[in-house]
Image (cartoon, helix red, strand yellow):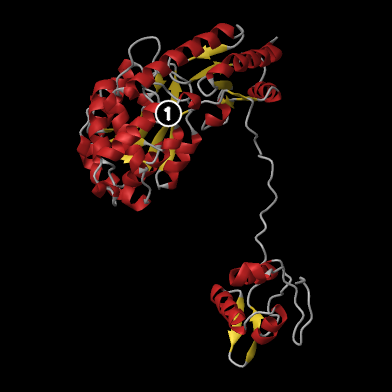
Amino acid sequence: MTDSWSSSGLDVHLGWQPSTGRSGLAAAIRAAIREGRWQPGAAVPSTRALAHDLGVARGTVTRVYADLAAEGYLRTAQGAPTRVATAGSLPQSAPRQAPRDPAPRWDLRPGRPDLTAFPRQAWITATRRALLRTPAAAFGYESELGAPELRDTLAGYLARARGVVADPARIVVCHGYSHAVAVVSRALSGLGVGEMAFENPSLATYRSIAAAQGPRVVGVPVDEHGMDVSALDSPAAVVTAAHQYPTGVTLAPPRRAALARWASESGAVVLEDDYDGEFRFDRQQVGALQALAPERVVYAGTASKTLAPALRLAWLVLPRTLVEPVRAAMADSGSRPALLNQLALAELIDSGAYDQHIRRSRAEYRSRRARLLAALPDSVRPYGIAAGLHLLLMLPPDGPSEATALAACRRRSIGIEGLGSYWMTPDGPGGLIVGYAATPKHAFAGATQHLVEALWEITA
């Protein structure tokens, strides 16, 4: 049988073979409509005419037309010809554009762990155990506070590893730290808090998230001793006490005590962002600020730096008075971290594999930081304590600008960030924020070499 023919009705062309049967005929008509060969609104052959031309039973064509009408391809009406009901053209995606910022060959961007070091086998084991041990009822609609298993586990872990005064009933599991900032800001706004203070410099993303929930955002200066507590005059403040981001300094002991005292006496709320507190290299980790004023400090932790950002797991340890407001804000947000990820993390911590992974990562990141410092030219000055996943390099005051340094890095396909975008005022000094954790282990030497070449180019 040929693909084209004449009939006593309308001439049509269908790429149909009898061996494909009724389903093949329906597919051929769909294709004709999608490809524009059967135009919208055009009459189609009658069932009798098409059946005659194709040499099939009229009932076959009738059923195909009925099916296509039900799908929306054809429109039928009593006493009128059947017509094409839709343009039905194949969806055309926009041409794929090259990424605006292609991935750098040498990834020294801050805030990222080495994803190649993710403990896959331990995570698989933890996930399998969680699936075997968890009752079916747990996979229903979960509490806004998070999985009870993870909250119980976090209470013990945070008390042991970070010195947090933790109670499972006061722990909320969030869909990442951005979500945590949003729900805390929303809860505080609902309680009448109209202003939140952030460290200056700090990450603009979190300032924007907080401001979007209602409070006005103001800046508080940071120096070599951390946030200037004496400059605080807001009912709420956000602080990276253990390792200020991005400068890398730690909040000095007198200021930690002053901040806790200020919050207790003024009734203010402090959100402590403990984003990488597990990674201190020169001595024992600094404990959480929260322990000094657990009824005024909200402790926030995350698995983004210890494991992977894609897990979208963060947690809050709340003062008693904020549990219900934050729970309500969680319900309003409609966002929940995946239950299975919560259960797997609980198993990972309980088994000891989480601590083992952190110790391995700590040793690796300590080594990388030392190797980077040893390779740097004397003209750049490292800033901050020996901790975390990044290093701030301050450029000479009379030397090249931050923009010049970033351009030299871009020419070598180095992913890196400048300090300038973190300031809340335009007059802050420039610098380079080097993330030494993101690069896979085998590529770290190459990344360091290219960074040093860029620095020598602009400072020689």
Asked whether 176 or 295 is in front, the reply is: 176
The x, y position of residue 145, in whole percent, is 27, 43
**What is the residue that sits farthest to the bottom in this orientation?**
79
Q: Is residue 117 left or right of residue 39?
A: left
Location of residue 454 by image quarter? top right
The x, y position of residue 15, in whole percent, is 72, 68
Q: Is residue 359 above or below residue 312?
A: above
Asked whether 343 or 48 is in front, the reply is: 48
Which residue sits at x=69%, y=44%?
Answer: 97
- Is residue 299 among what the camera can see? no
Which residue sits at x=74%, y=71%?
Answer: 37
Location of residue 302 by image quarter? top left
Q: Is residue 224 left or right of residue 443?
A: left
Location of residue 269 by image quarter? top left
Quadrant position of the C terminus in the picture: top right
Q: Residues within 10 Å of mark 1 (few under 14, many from 20)?
A: few
Which residue sits at x=33%, y=21%?
Answer: 355
Q: Which residue is mark 1?
A: 120
The x, y position of residue 108, in whole percent, is 57, 23
- Is residue 36 among what the camera can see? yes
Which residue sits at x=64%, y=25%?
Answer: 105
Q: Is residue 410 above or below residue 27?
A: above
Quadrant position of the N terminus in the picture: bottom right
Task: Specify the amino acid type for callout 1.
Answer: Arg
Q: Is residue 347 left or right of residue 98?
A: left
The x, y position of residue 67, in whole percent, is 55, 75
Q: Is residue 199 above or below residue 83?
A: above
Q: Is residue 407 left or right of residue 214?
A: right
Q: Secondary structure at mark 1?
A: helix
Asked whether 120 or 404 is in front, the reply is: 120
Q: How many marks?
A: 1
